[in-house]
Amino acid sequence: MYRLTNTTQHYAWGSPSAISELLGREPSGQPEAELWMGAHPTAPSRIDGGEATLLDFVSADPVGMLGPQVAAEFKNRLPFLLKVLSSAKALSIQTHPTRAQAEVGYAAEQERGLPAGDPNRNYADDWPKPEILMALTAFEALAGCRTAEDAERVLAELVELGADALDPVRASLADRPEPATVAAAIGRLLEWPADTRGELVAGVVEACRIGADKGGESAEDFAAVLRVAEDFPGDIGLVAMLLMNRVVLKPGEAIFLEAGGLHAYLNGTGIELLANSDNVLRAGLTPKHIDVAELLRVMDASVPVPVRHGKAIGVGVEEFDTPAPEFRLYRATLDTGTTLRAEIPGTGPRIVLALSGEVELRGTRGALTLTQGESCFVPAREGRVEATGIADLVVAAPGL
């Protein structure tokens, strides 16, 4: 087993303190958005504080590190990336492609000669990017699209409150109440003429201000728009987000984002586990590239994003089951004297993160102790791993 030293990503939307508090260190004074644990080429974890990375180790011995099945299925690549994510501001509204869409899109951009890192690229690699987010604090998110009927209701309320420019979009939803109409309405908003876009957004924000003060079924959704508008004034995503479902996860609850599902994280701290990819198609709340045509090709407004709860699979152990073959998320709570005498949850290569407490992991080749904020990589060849201590752990493993 290998202790990991991980990279903190200082994106502008990050919390100034939540990740530092988890790691038990003083805040850096910068926004701390994500802590990455894995073998992603952009920021692979380092092994035991040295210069060698987990990517180096996996590349040198893929079968020993990943196991023969995972190595064959994912072409010698660790298929998942584990993160702690902490948002003080909204992330962009976005969706992710299927594996087939990513392969086709990446190949097309390679053929066009777009260099890596080009801001006009949609596809950074040829992988899908399903993800699951488990809340550690109250976590506000936009998760999937409203039904056409519900979207029409919200827009009708906004028209009544003075956002008259939305009436044609509202009427389209009333005429054809189906998911494809919601996707078309979002596309229509994103392509709103530049010369009147500012007026549209200002009118919607003002209607939300009136509606939030007035109260009613949509008041909290309107209030969310007002909060986000402080950081993204004039962004057309403020209008698009009203066609999406807003949820507030309680600690321990989760949402799974499969390919095509539109979503955005607004604020809170959570554990994010995703396929080892950077593919993002954006729809708003961002200064970055938005390709509306490609977004609409990939987006599926019918994809449900329900709140998920862990399923008990043993004493103190929960599994967050998803159909993603790249990953499976587990949470284990150890009390005094508790020992997981079978394997640490999951099989194959695993990453273990201690959210609190102290735990001793003992495998066939040795032992390692983790305290709050520390993490380690368990190679597939390690086999059986027992855990003892008083600790709250998350475990990432393949979903095969």
Image (tube, grey):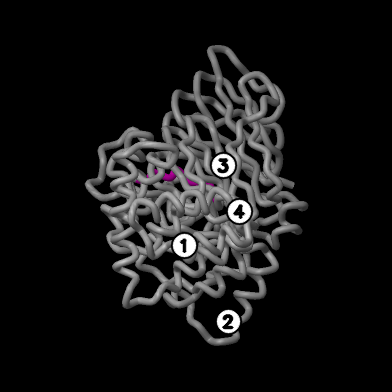
First to last magenta residue range: 79-87
Q: Residue at x 48, y 35 (%)?
A: 249
Q: Is residue 389 above or below residue 237?
A: above
Badge number at residue 130: 4
Q: Residues within 10 Å of mark 4 (few under 14, many from 20)?
A: many
Q: Which residue is mark 1?
A: 42
- Within the magenta stretch, is there residue 84? yes
Labels 2 & 1 near each other (Cβ < 8 A): no
Precedes in sequence: disc 2 or disc 1: 1
Badge number at residue 72: none
SS of the residue under disc 4:
loop
Labels 3 & 4 near each other (Cβ < 8 A): no
Precedes in sequence: disc 1 or disc 3: 1
Q: Label 4 sits on what residue type?
A: Pro
Precedes in sequence: disc 4 or disc 1: 1
Can you name the residue that lies furthest to the top here?
336
Foreground of the two, 26 or 93: 93
Q: Which residue is mark 2?
A: 110
